[in-house]
Structure formats: C-alpha cells, structure tokens
Image (cartoon, grey):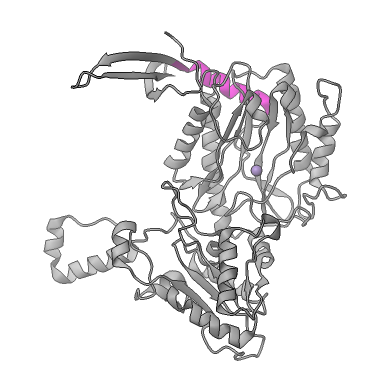
Amino acid sequence: MRFAPESSVRAMGMAGLALLLACASHVSLAQQRREREPNEVYAARRARLAAQTDAPVILWGFTGREEISQSYIFAQEDNFYYLTGHNEEEAGLVILPALKAGQVRDSWDGPREILFLPAKDPGKEKWNGVRLAPSDPDISSRTGFASVQPFGEMRAVVEKLARAYRKFATILPFEKELGGYPHEKAVVDWLQLVDSSVKPKDIRGVIETLRMTKSPGEIAFLKKAINLSLDAHLEAMKMMRAGLYEYQVGAKMLEVHAMGGSEAEGYAPIVGAGPNSTVLHYDKLARKIADGDIVVIDVGAQFSGYSSDITRTLPANGKFTPRQREIYDVVLGAQNAVFAALKPGMNYCKSGDKSLYKISYDYINSHGKDLHGKRLGQYYIHGLGHNIGLDVHDPGDYCQPLAPGMVVTVEPGIYIPEENLGVRIEDDLLITDSGFEFLSERLPRDPADIEKIMAAAGKSQAVAEFYWDFVAKFRKDGSPITTHGRETQLYRSEKGVWRLVHVHYSGMPVTGQREGF
Ligand SMILES: [Mn+2]
C-alpha cells in the first residue's frame, strides 16, 4: 500500500479520504509472512484433522515470550501455522471433532472451530505494529474462521468443552525430551488447570502425518527457498578461495537469500573448512580457509516459513586433491545409487529391502578405504536424509514408505577427522507418482563441473587486501585512539576491463593472524 501524495488526498475530498484510510487498515499486516496459502487450504487441513479426532483439539500458538534474545523475530509454532496460516503472537485454536454422516449436532452446540486472538491493544500496536483482532470487522474473511473470539475467553470455552466431551486432544510433549519443549508443557499444564479430571490425548501424530504430504502452495514456497539457496551456493562456488574466512562465505550466501526475499535462514549456516568439514553442525564459521582445505557448505534459505536444505563440498583452492576427489566420488556415487532407486514405496529405514539408507551405506562401505585400509561405512555417521517443510527437519518417520507429495533430502556423507576430510552432498527432491522431481538439480554436483565454475570465476576475479594497525592522538582530551582492521577490494573483469566491484571493511577477527605489517 502506497499513500497518495498530500495534494491528491486533498483533491479526493472526505469520502475519498475515508476510503483510502479503510484500504490502509485493511492491508496493514504487521506480522504476516511474505506469502501465504489461501484460507481454504488451511481450512481443509483443519477439516482433515477434525475427521480424525474424537476429542476437541486445543492448541496454542507461540506467545512471543519463548525468546529473550533482542534479535528474535516472531515465527509461529509450526503445527499452529500449518493449520491456520496465522503468524502473530498469543493465538489459540479449538477444533471440534467432525460430525458423523447424518449427524446434525453432538454434545456441543457452539461453533465447530474457533480462533482465539488477543483483544485489540492500540498502545502495544504503537510499538509492534497492527495485529489482527477479534473486533476487526473483516476478521472472518481475513482469517478464514467463522468464529474469532478474544483469547481471554478461551478458558471459559475449554471448560464448557470439558463438560461436553470429557476429553481433549493436544500436542503432548515428547517424553524423551525431558518433559518436552516448554511451550508444549505449558499448554498441557494449562489444560490440567482448566479441568484436571480430563487427561489430554496426543494429536501430534495426526498433524505430523498431514504435514508429510505437501500442498501445491507449500511446494511452491519450498521451490522458492531452494532456488534462492542454489543462487547462494553458486555465489559461494564463485567466491571460494584460500584466505577467506568461513563467515565471509556465509555472509555472501545470506545476502543472496535476503536480497531474494528470504525472511530467515532455514537453520544456522554451516561453512566448515579443513577440520571443521567433519563437524556436522559446525556453526562458528571462524576459520580462515587455508589452501588445500576442503569446505562443506550446508546453507539453506527459508521462504515464507518453508526451509530448503542444501549442501555442497568444495575445494578451497578450486582443485580437489586426488584423495579429496576419491572420497568425493564415493559420496557422489552413493547419492546417485539412491537416486536410481528413489520412488514411492522406498523408505529411509536403516535396513530392509526398501531401504534407501542401506543402498547408500552399502555403496560407501564397498568403495574406498581409510588410511588404515578399513572400509568407509564407519565414517557415514548420520541418516540418509529427512523431510523438509515448515521445519528444516520436518516430521517424518524414517520407515514410512515415501509417497507422492513428500519433499525430502538425500544427503550421504563421509567424515574422516584423522584426514581433516569431510564430504557431504545434499539435495532436495519432490517425490512424484513415478519417481521424483530433482528440485536442486541446477546446482552442479559433478566435481569436474564444480572445478570448471571455480576456475572460470577465478580468472575474472581478483582480490586485494590491506591491513592497518595504528595508534593516534585523535580525541579532544588527548587520549589515544587505536584501530586495526582490514580492507578487502574485489575486482571483476568485464569485457577485458578490470573493475572494482566491492569494498569491504572489517575489524581483525580475534581468531585471525594479522598479516602485512
Ligand atoms: Mn539436511
């Protein structure tokens, strides 16, 4: 929404002004994600859930108080978002079990689903922006809920439901997580407060099964996230060289994501060079990349809530050593063996004749050796992959057969700490009726193709770095000012002419050796 210039507002007169203001309030969605599926899609998910429960489903969204960090930007709890498309704080949801065929009503005479939102709070909105409120005149059409009530009334409604049904369903905390995530525990505790005689049933499995099969809208968001990540990985390939810090490669990739409309990273970016290439979730990005390092880059954008997950492994200096190439080829061979068998009905179980994991493990364990002549299977220390979606590790059961509409990663890897040599290749795939759509195919995996891209970029790119370190009496009171830092100049050759395309100033990282003085 752009506001009209002052003069045209005046010319419109009061009627026009009133209309303009009405439009303005209609489009101010402070918290909503960049794109969202139509309301009917979320409503259809709730209907599928209602058909699979005999107890009222009671959920809370995140409150916004889950995080203390000042850099935190609110992001809705995934299951709540999946069912509502609502990305604002302090919402609640009640879904009644579907009526059976021919049934006009059951023991409940109220609405069959209710969205609870915080009451309008103009004071808070001055700080945080406009929020959807139950009192908004168009709240039903905007949320897709016929009944939207103040969150403060949720308790009374749930008390009535307890009397009508004598049972609840919610997401129970995972027992293995030491009592569960605080949010899940808070909802269960609250339900016990409302009526301690009703023991909540777990609805997690039903929602997670729904989430495994992606809607066309979800697939579109995932493709956007994936494509931004492919662009970012190509930039990383082109800029990669010894002397860069891991975080600089990460920074460039985040810039590509953000400039392309990504709202956040799907997960903490991993750029691990040399010894760090063998650390699966390395997130410090502090090493100065050395000549001869191999670099694992596992970086994926999120778009409108949906996360990609892509990994490439590059030689820092543009050329794999024979040993790096040998291990790389084993991982690539394992991934290709999986692709050859990837279709509905196969699974990610550790064993069995439908196991894709076993195909990748057997390939790795029958090709190549470590420095002691031992097989490489022991260095493949994680699973073959996982579903992606609202969560980068989206719900999915490893032994469940793959089915059309699932989006999964295939990411074999070998990590040999003794050789400072880790290789992972990770791609994203949509399972189709007959096989799969290769969503990240545009990003080369073939080592010769990768070396070609790196060599071409190297020829048309040059970097100059300057370091300074000085002490001077600059301040009025005569006290010394000390500065040290680095200036990086990036030149690119365009049509035979070298141009300075980027200048970057940074402090000297404490992890780095100072050079040049
Ligand atoms: Mn992954």
Query: Observer-nearest residue: 98 or 245?
Result: 245
Residue range highlighted in magenta: 446-463
Q: Quadrant of the N terminus?
A: bottom left
Q: Residue at x 73, y 17 (%)?
A: 322
Q: Residue at x 52, y 70 (%)?
A: 40
Q: Note whether 141 is above or below 73 in the view shown.
A: below
Q: Residue at x 42, y 40 (%)?
A: 259
Q: Position of residue 429 (x, y in %)?
A: 66, 47
Q: Note whether 283 is above or below 152 in the view shown.
A: above
Q: Position of residue 3 (x, y in %)?
A: 23, 57
Examine the rendering and report whether any part of residue 86 can be seen: yes
- Number of marks in the rendered image: 0
Q: Quadrant of residue 171?
A: bottom right
- Residue 300 placement, left or right of 119: right
Q: Note whether 78 is above or below 92 in the view shown.
A: above
Q: Position of residue 10 (x, y in %)?
A: 12, 62
Ligand 1 image-quadrant field: top right
Q: Position of residue 304 (x, y in %)?
A: 49, 53
- Residue 130 placement, left or right of 68: left
456 drawn magenta:
yes
Q: Quadrant of the C terminus?
A: top left
Q: Quadrant of residue 139?
A: bottom left
Query: Observer-nearest residue: 255 or 418?
Result: 418
Q: Residue at x 27, y 69 (%)?
A: 22
Magenta stretch, overall SS: helix
Examine the rendering and report whether any part of residue 112 can be seen: no
Q: Note whether 71 is above or below 322 in the view shown.
A: below
- Residue 36 placement, left or right of 176: left
278 drawn magenta:
no
